[in-house]
Amino acid sequence: MSKGLKTTIIILAVMVAVGLVTLPSLRRAVERQRATPTPQTEEQSRREVMQQPISTSTDVQVQAQLYWLSAGSPTALEPTAVLLPLSADPVERSKQLINALILRAPSAEKRTLPAEASLLAFYVQPDGTAIADFSDEIISGMPSGILSEQMAVESVALTLGANVPGIKQLKVLVHGQEAETLAGHLDLYGMFPVPSLAPAAGSDNVGVAATTKKIPPKK
Amino acid sequence: MVLSFARLLRISLEAQGLRVLLTRQANDDPSFDDRSRVANAQRNGIFISLHVASTGQPGTVRVYSLLQPTAGPQSAANAPRGALLSWDRAQYKFIEQSRRLAELIQIQMAQHFHGSSETPFEAPVRQLRTVAAPAVAIEVSSVSVQDKGALDQMGPGLADGVARAVAAFRTIYESGGR
């Protein structure tokens, strides 16, 4: 046996020995890694937070009118009465309504906003302009077409108009930015009118169609 | 699918002696402004934006003219005569003509495709806003049909109906009518 071959065999034997020694600790490290939950992406974390039910001290159970696609006609919207805890604060109330519009669609056929979309922020300016900021999924999950995009925005506008007094027009943002279109067709350049269907502010019901029991605030 | 509709429409319009420019030739995707640039470089043209929707009642066609935003950009229709036309609001001066063109096309679509509305629609369609000419968007429903052949079969009727409506529109406006 040559001297070089002997050296190679010795080196290989040492490497095998080192491998055998380190193998158990390597296995433990892999098991530890498996047990650790995968870190969430920023988007996943934000969605979890946003989809937490919004609860305020002024919440009351209300028969809210939510606008989804009509069962009889896929080209029209119709109101559906849904019992919801709604805040007296117009901003929180609007967030509750839009979240319900996304999360409580009666069926896939009636849905107007993508299930994976979330409302990131909502503001109401003193002149009655509401600004709704949606996550990117409002674009990526939207069925393409003028009709579907128009139905999506109108369902938000009509739902706000029917349940929140004082909102006159709606501006849609996507991920905090002005977007050119919703999903390639509907222009997001301007404002969308919000028809005033809610009872006037100042009434006892604060734009509520019916009053039932008051919900205690969450601790 | 949209491109095949556009090619059929081109044949029908050229048969009437009209010159037709397609803003998209293949699966390229020009921007809204690129398409508007092509349209706005023409004199006495009209602009037709074709779409196939993912939703809507299958086998029907909806025709849209631009719904002008209620707030934000000011109406160009009220701009002084001779004033420069803002690119972002180029369509505002043509809203009435576009509405008339949409009416004529929608009537044809109702005749060709059972269940289609007889009256046109208005929507803030992005592509239309920057076109400085009578402009409409035509949306065919829908890609959700089980049999894609049914959608293909709409092509000839669509092309024929739109060509007839465009001919009527041309007659009205060349005679100075409203």
Image (spheres, coloured by chain):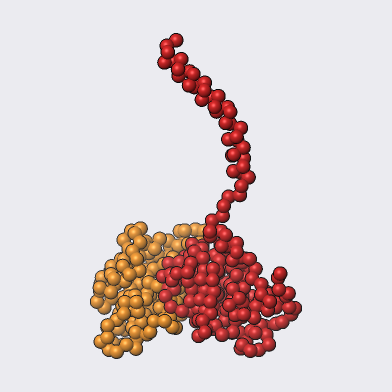
Chain colours: A red, B orange
- The quarter of the image holding the N terminus of chain A is top left
Q: Is residue B83 above or below residue B48?
A: below
Residue positioned 63% across, 66% down in the render: A52
Q: List x then y, in percent, for residue A125.
A: 51, 81
**Residue A163 in picture, x, y percent from top left:** 61, 80
Residue in front for this viewpoint, B14 or A32: A32
Look at the image and tell me whether residue B178 can be seen. Answer: no
| A162 lies left or right of A150 | right
> x and y percent of residue A32 in the render?
62, 42
| The image quarter in which residue B78 lies | bottom left
Residue located 34% across and 77% down the image: B88
Name the quadrant of the C terminus of chain A: bottom right
Q: How many marks?
A: 0
Task: Tell whether A213 sits left or right of B80.
Answer: right
Residue reaching furthest top? A1
Q: Position of residue A206 (x, y in %)?
A: 65, 84
Is residue B45 shown above or below A44? below
Query: In which image quadrant can residue A31 be found?
Result: top right
Q: Quadrant of residue B99?
A: bottom left
Q: Is residue A216 at all visible to an observer of this figure?
A: yes
Q: Judge whether A31 appears above or below A93 on screen.
A: above
Left or right of A1 on screen, residue A98? right
Q: Residue at x 70, y 82 (%)?
A: A210
Residue depicted at x 51% and y 65% = A135
Q: Nearer the viewer, residue A151 or B115?
A: A151
Looking at the image, which is closer to me, A95 or A148? A95
